[in-house]
Amino acid sequence: MARGRVTRLTACDVRFPTSLGAHGSDAMHTDPDYSTAYVTLETDAEDGLKGYGITFTLGKGTEVVVCAVNALAPHVLNKDLGDIVGDFRGFYRQLTSDSQLRWKHSSCLEAQTSFSCILLPNQIGPEKGVVHLATAAILNAVWDLWAKQEGKPLWKLLVDMDPRTLSSCIDFRYISDVLTEEEACEILQKNQAGKKEREAQMLTQGYPAYTTSCAWLGYSDDRLKQLCTEALKGGWTRFKVKVGADMQDDVRRCGLIRDMIGPEKTLMMDANQRWDVPEAVEWMARLAEFKPLWIEEPTSPDDILGHAAISRALAPLGIGVATGEQCHNRVIFKQLLQARALQFLQIDSCRLGSVNENLSVLLMAKKFGIPVCPHAGGVGLCELVQHLIIFDFISVSASLENRLP
Ligand SMILES: C[C@H](O)[C@@H](O)[C@@H](O)[C@H](O)C(=O)O
Ligand SMILES: [Mg+2]
């Protein structure tokens, strides 16, 4: 039973100077400082439990997200946790429907920030951008607190919930043309069979993952080789390499990594939105010799039909398109699925509106038969997303085929 009235919400701006070592660098983000807007919720339940929620940011942007968290705080403060999770769909909708925040603000947001006043762009929502990141951080904290009060890790809380209750956490507005609440319940109900076995499998074997840590774009060839050698020794079998800034560099680096890992191990490539559509197709035709499983974010994350065109062009080369880490919301995922624009769907536990919205995307992906390979890394993303993908395996997809988080 969720208990206590929310008495305090704090949002901290936490940053790590990763740009100093080019860690996390890619073709578009050349100097990322891995950061997070870190939310803590406290209640009057006197159980000593706190809920922690984050959203991943890259340095300066964190200040703006913290500001938006503070602007949303009145929706959470003084609310009973039982009431929040008892009508989770309603609460999600309340947070995403704040009439002034979803459209624009007329005065400065009240926030502890070094700017005297933060002028956010006129349109700061709806269900996208800074307000949605703030929503994710707050809702992640609510889910964390609820799971702690239940004495379970989040994945287990989700796995143990009955299909009706789970579906009642989802806002089906804008997606009911492809997934109704009834269909969601049916998918979950069908997968009750075999759940125990899959849970045991996760507990004994874990969920297979890949590594990006060897091949950030700003790393020298020597560093890449050294990290790749260590990763191979550590037993990694799937590697992602950053591409997209310079063709000659890409050819050399991809050749180097493919030589080191051999023909059997899996290689993925990530362009972080660098290309136009025709450029993406040409560039990947050149890199096809290195046998990538997917090209990630080949173009603008908003270009659904562009992704579909790239998917069609690269299919004969055996290269899939992966995207999602910058996908604003369930509506964009719905259209990517409808347009057959992606072959690997990458949810992000902090860009979508937390668990609530991620549940809807996991279920839509299941309906379309597209594997979910979450975006991880960053600050806290691996820690958060493991709960969603383990839940996905046990309760939704029931498959590990083509799934690489
Ligand atoms: C700036 C970041 O490190 C990104 O490059 C990273 O999230 C990346 O897109 C990934 O897929 O891991
Ligand atoms: Mg990526």
Image: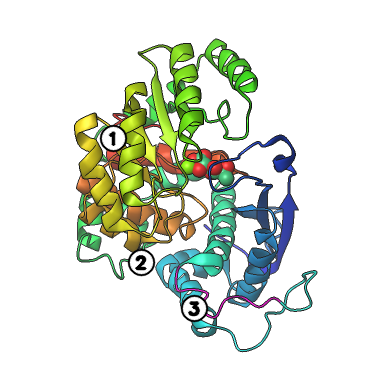
Residue 178, given in percent of the width and then of the height, sits at: 20, 60
Is disc 1 placed on a helix, strand or loop? loop
Which residue is labeled 3 in the image? 102
**For the residue marked with disc 1, what is the amino acid?**
Ala
Specify whether residue 25 is painted magenta.
Answer: no
**For the residue marked with disc 3, what is the amino acid?**
Arg
Which residue is labeled 1 in the image? 398
Question: Is 258 situated left or right of 73 in this image?
Answer: left
Is disc 3 placed on a helix, strand or loop? helix
> Seen from this angle, which residue lies furthest bottom?
106
One can see residue 95 in this view: yes
> Seen from this angle, which residue lies furthest front?
248
Q: Between tags 3 and 1, which lies in front? A: 3
User: Ligand 1 closer than 8 Å to the CB at disc 2?
Assistant: no
Residue 108, given in percent of the width and then of the height, sits at: 68, 83
Compared to residue 50, the image places residue 394 above or below, namely above
* Label 3 crowd bin: few (<14), some (14–19), many (20+), radius 10 Å: many
Q: Which mark is residue 171?
A: 2
Q: Nearer the viewer, residue 361 or 170?
A: 361
Compared to residue 51, the image places residue 122 above or below, namely below
User: Ligand 1 closer than 8 Å to the CB at disc 1?
Assistant: no
Compared to residue 34, the image places residue 129 above or below, namely below
Answer with mark 3 or mark 2, whichever residue precedes in sequence.
3
